[in-house]
Image: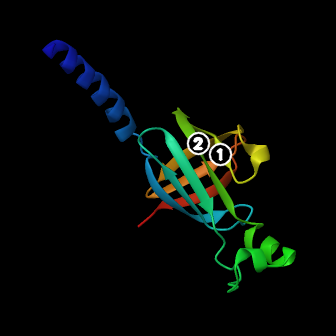
Amino acid sequence: MRNAVCAALAVLFGITSAFAQNPLVGSWERIKADPPDEMAFLILSTDGFFTQTILPDDRPKINRPLRDLTKEELVVRYEQLVARRGPYRVEGNRLIRKDAAHHNPNLIGRENVELWRIEGDTLILSNLQGKDTNWYKRAK
C-alpha cells in the first residue's frame, strides 16, 4: 500500500512539476496588439486551462437595466467584448488554445495556434508566420 501511495504521489508531483515549470502559467495583461485592439486579460493555469477576457475601457456607462437599453446602446456596450475559455497545451514554442466556450458560439471548438516567447517580463505571441501580434506583461 505504501508503495502505491508513493507511486501515485510521484506521478502527481511529476504532473504538477511539469506545469509549475511552464513559464506561461500565470495572469497576463495585454499591453499592445498589432493590429491595435482593446486590452485583454489572459490566465493560463497550472492544470492546462485558460481564460481570456477583453473588456474595453471606453464603454459608455448607462445607468439603466439591460432590458431597458436600446439596440444601439447594447451593441456599443457589448460588440467589442470577448470572453473565452478552454484547455491549452504547449508544444515547443507553440501555444495551442481550444475554445471550449466563447462569447461567439460560432467559435466554440476552434483551435488557436500561436508562437510564443518571453523577453524579460514580456510574453510575446506571434502568428504562425512569425509576425508579432500581442504583447503581455504579468498582471500585478
Picture coordinates of residue 85, whole percent (x, y): 59, 47
| Left or right: where 80 falls relative to 99 | right
Write the residue at 84% across / 78% down.
70
Q: Which residue is mark 1?
A: 101
Q: Residue furthest left?
A: 2
Amino acid type, mark 2:
Gly
User: Does 79 appear above or below 61?
Assistant: above
Q: Which residue is mark 2?
A: 86
Q: Residue furthest right?
A: 71
CB of mark 2 within 8 Å of CB of mark 1? yes
| Left or right: where 136 falls relative to 110 | left
Pick the residue in front: 109 or 90: 109
Pick the residue in front: 128 or 9: 9
Picture coordinates of residue 127, whole percent (x, y): 69, 45
Q: Quarter of the image holding residue 11? A: top left
Tag 1's secondary structure?
A: strand
Write the residue at 23% across / 17% down.
7
Picture coordinates of residue 22, whole percent (x, y): 41, 40
User: Does 74 appear above or below 25?
Assistant: below
Write the residue at 16% across / 13% down.
1
